[in-house]
Amino acid sequence: MKDTAPKWERRAGLPGRAWDYDALRELVRGEGLPLGVVDLDCLERNIQRVARIASASQKTIRIATKSVRCPELTRHILDFGGKAFKGLMCYSAPEAAFLARQGFDDLLIAYPSVQNEEFEMVFELTLAGKQVILMIDEAMHVELLTKFFKVKEVPADFSFSVCLDVDLSLRPFSGALHLGVQRSPIRSLEDFNRMVRLILNTKHLTLSGIMGYEAQIAGVPDGNPFTPLLNPIVAWVKSQSKKAVARRREAISRYLDAQSVRLEIFNGGGSGSIKSTVREPWLTEVTVGSGFLQSHIYDYFGENECEPAFCFALPVTRIPEPGMVTCQSGGFVASGAASWDKSPIPFLPEGLRALPSEGFGEVQTPLRNRSQKKLLPGDPVFFRPAKAGEIAERFNEYLLRRGNEIEARVKTYRGLGQCFY
């Protein structure tokens, strides 16, 4: 008989479903809804999967904190991952400062900082002995830092560590197409050379790292059930990109060797590209975030081996007609180009579907109910979000589940009164 279980469920190697509606309903009985649940056993299996892939290629994993947004979960991932895990990739300087206060170190800020308030935060962290690396990708970023140094009294031996973000988009047909994301303007080895020279000749700056994120590989599913006609095109883009990205990062590595420039980190990849990224010997680390909790969009990546480790619950509030239920809230649609793969998906019980005419609403979400469960007002329905980090902005805490027990409750950034833009 053909195995019709979901891909993630088959590869989990479990004797049955990792998630069960009746068990989850009992787990949250008496809890206020909506709420979020993280399964620690699933999370730890995901951490082990990622660690094995990294260790086999002698790479370390840097955690993308914006895909977790919960300090205690980030700490658990670091601790459970052991030597295979090193450092955090933060969204912004304020997030890095917050995580430093929580006891974390080795903080790579993934996006450029351009405000004096942000420079001040990194300055204070560096003086305090924290390892913080700023991201830059154009001369204006260096100019802004230089202006900051002029108005700020800094020790003669003080230095900001910086990382150069290099564009790795695919541009076929002589650049007529741009396949990737609009990030860095460093698009050639000549551009890279100019920026390296500028940094090396600027007082108080140290070139500590290079980052090249292959978004058209790591961020685009190759088996997306919501856009099946595009999947062959995506597969072609990915196959071409993997070769081009490896060549460009190798050229950067060779250039740095020729110039005797030594780096602390050479970062690449993401949850959706980990297997191909770790093969590049010049890289020192790979970033992983969403794969730990496994939001549903990562089910559709061929390189991803992880299983769902979290979900959120909404209460049924109405039965508008037979075969329908309506849940309170639910408009937790992920960022990016608007499409169905950015919406949550009903998880448990099986057999629920959102309505194309209404989708997921801010105040209510109607669902077609073809499940075997009789759902009544007050019953929970469980969903998986499209992206892992953004959903944390909707909840003050996550319930941590171990087996059929709630082992702990941990605060999200929102629950700790933090909001980073």
Image (cartoon, grey):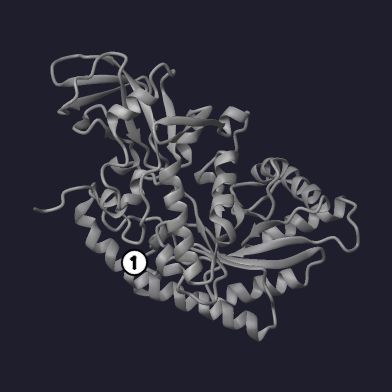
**The C terminus lies in quadrant:** top right
Q: Position of residue 157 (x, y in %)?
A: 88, 64
Residue 160 location, x and y as percent? 76, 59
Near mark 1 (Cα within 10 A), the count class, few <14, some 14-19 or many ≥20, is many
In the displayed structure, 139 sits above or below 337; it is below
Name the residue located 68 percent from the left edge and 59 percent from the top edge. 140
Numbered marks: total: 1
Mark 1 — residue? 238
Residue in the image at 34% along x and 41% along y = 342
Residue 270 visible within the image: no
**Local SS, label 1:** helix
Where is residue 197? Give x, y as percent: 70, 75
Which sits in the foreground, 11 or 7?
11
**In the picture provided, is 322 more to the left or to the right than 420?**
left
Residue farthest left in this picture: 1
Tell which residue pokes out farthest to the bottom in this image: 258
Left or right of 150 on screen, residue 161: left
Image height of 398 relative to 257, above or below = above
The spot of residue 141 in percent (x, y) is 68, 58
Q: Quadrant of residue 101?
A: top right
Viewer-proximal residue among 314 and 45: 45
- Residue sitting nearer the eye, 303 or 29: 29
21 sits to left or right of 397? left
Amino acid at pointer 1: Lys
Is residue 187 visible to the viewer in this orientation of the structure? yes
310 shown above or below 114:
above
Residue 368 sits above or below residue 138 on the image: above
Q: Residue at x 57, y 57 (%)?
A: 82
